[in-house]
Image (cartoon, coloured by chain):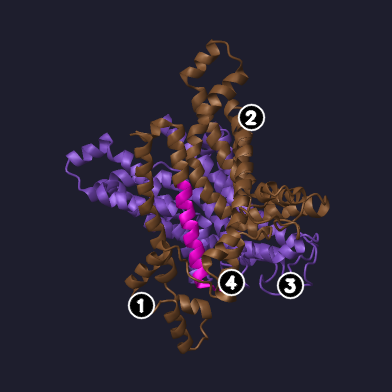
Amino acid sequence: MSLRAYVITRILMTIPMILILLTLVFLVMRVLPGNPVIAIVGMKASPQYIKKLEHQLGLDKPLWLQYVDYLGNLLRGDLGRSMIWGKRPVIQEIMDHFPATLELTIGGFLVSVILGLATGMVAGIRSGGKLDASMRIYSITVYSLFIPLLGMMLQLVFGVWLHLLPVGGRIDPGLEPPAITGLYVLDSLLALKLDSLTSALAHLVLPSFTLGLVLSGIYTRLVRSSLMEVLGQDFIRACKARGLPGRAILFRHALKNALIPILTMMGLQFALLLAGAVLTETTFSWPGMGTFLVERITYRDFTTIQGSIVFYALFVALVSLVVDLVYAYVDPRIRY
Amino acid sequence: MRTFNVSRFLDSVRDAGLDGYMMVAGLLIVVTVLIMAVFAEFIAPYDPVKIVGMPVTPPSPKFPWGTDTIGRDVFSRVVYGSRTIMVVILMSTALSMLIGIPLGLISGYVGGSLDRVLSLIMDSIYAFPGLILAIAVAAMLGPGIYNTSISLAVVYIPTYFRMVRGQVLSLREQLFVEAARALGATDWRILRKYIFPNVFFIIAVVFSLNVADAILTEAGLSFLGLSVPAPTPDWGFDLKNGQRYFLSGKWWPVMFPGLMIILLALGFGLLGEGLNRMLGQKEVR
């Protein structure tokens, strides 16, 4: 299969996945026991008010018609309007918060990859030894770390005791860079505002480290097993026979091949990053999608909750598509 | 049936080296928390929902782990909290298994378009961030022990489905299954007598690793205030309650429930890892 044919097939395969996820969200929001309207206004609301709200949300129509409306609106990019505070379009509210989450997940991703590569390589090279055993314990332990507790401890040590880093928020007030991409680090770079850049980076350190450390254990074991497999192959022995130094074999030949299968895991890993980001954001009062979603749940803002979940679903499908395409590009074997 | 022999078990633990020790350490943690949960009435010195002292009193002989933000005994709340999380986790896992395992067996065994459709659905759910899915379901169902269990169960059905289906796919082609079929065994009999027993041990491993994950998800839901309602002791929620005092140095309302979450997740994680390798080794030998 040519790369182009693969790309087209893979894009087509994404459509049922998105449809299933959207249907799932629909089912969760409507068909689960419990009336969303009563969930919004509480048991004590008058029946007239409940009727009115049901009509306003289109919940009085037959279920199949609601489903058609729901998909139709989504196709037009319409996620509805928020039910509180000026009734802004949900998509706008999401766009206000999504860059913060993206910035945090990128930070967490980098930390987890760096830590995971380092620990995984140590374990893979010294497989079977004491270091390997400690890296196994490392990967299990960091995965069990509960993000809020880890985050608070880092806040206490680096923020309160050592006064090195801020304990929460995205940037010092007043230093926000002009909105270009919404990613503060990138925007400050583009606008050449050095004080914004340092502030944004300083705020990013603790949340990224919290999120990245917890997820790094997954990479530790992936890198380890992948590296061990590659190191056992004939071409590595051939390298050794030609008298290449160990360092060159590892970095120039083994690692490159060992990293290919890890690419596939990045899609699923991204879902873990997004989930972990919800807890990281609430711990560090990071104004992203997670804090936004949880806040709107307490206000019972039904349309915003639904819109946010839909947005997450689309984003996850997109990321898994991109990861697969990159994989197919890097490793031609996958296309056949 | 072989009888269980303690000394032989200890020998096999020692032979397994690190895996054996990890499994035993995990088992000890899990059993300790289970004992806490079952005998909470006898272990906890105070009523977990009663105000028994001044707010945020530091640990002292009277309150070994101090008091929380409104003056309840942290130790008693942690002890009773183990019951909440254990009940939720066991109910949700049972529910995930009850749905995921049979669907996985059927999907893998029958194959064809049924398998394709089921796999696509399960893979889609699996790809979705677990905690966020649980948040969505929990937000719609409202708080409560049963509702929280359902929210978690939805997240972990695909884990059991995928694992069982994968096993069935490889078992289906094996000689002993073919032999059974040649002898005229019905599909139901093949599934029950030949395939399910071979899937069983892997379910034990997946159960253990999956519960480690589920504990963190439950604690996350609880931290966000989407698990059981307020006065019920629940580790994640108690941790959240103590958060605003934590940075001023009053660490005990946060630290103890938080460490318990980590310890319990670690316990199941170690148990699963150890089991995995030990059972894996047996297959190779």
In percent of width and height, residue A41 lies at 52, 80
Amino acid tagged 2:
Lys
Nearest to N terminus: mark 1 or mark 2:
1
Check contact, mark 4 vs mark 3: CB within 8 A: no
Residue hosting label 2: A130
Q: Nearer the viewer, residue B51 or A92?
A: A92
Residue B2 locus on image (x, y percent)? 41, 41
Query: Magenta span has A303?
Result: yes
> Tag 2, which chain?
A
Q: In the image, A10: left or right of A276? A: left
The numbered mark 4 sits on a residue in which chain? A
Up-down relation of residue B143 to residue A125 (above or below): below
Label 1, label 2: how many angstroms apart (C-alpha)?
A: 65 Å
- Judge if badges 1 and 2 mark residues of a common chain: yes
Which dot marks residue A298?
Answer: 4
Q: Chain of mark 1?
A: A
- Residue corresponding to mark 1: A61
Start-end of magenta stretch: A299-320
* Chain coloured purple in this rendering: B
**Kind of residue sitting beneath label 3:** Ile
Question: Which residue extends farthest top?
Answer: A242
Q: Residue at x 51, y 39 (%)?
A: B9
Determine the secondary structure under disc 1. Answer: loop
Judged by its main secondary structure, the magenta piece is: helix
In the rendered image, is residue A305 in sight? yes
Q: Secondary structure at mark 4?
A: helix
Q: Secondary structure at mark 2?
A: helix
Instruction: Give the left or right position of residue B79, taking residue B209 as reference.
Output: right
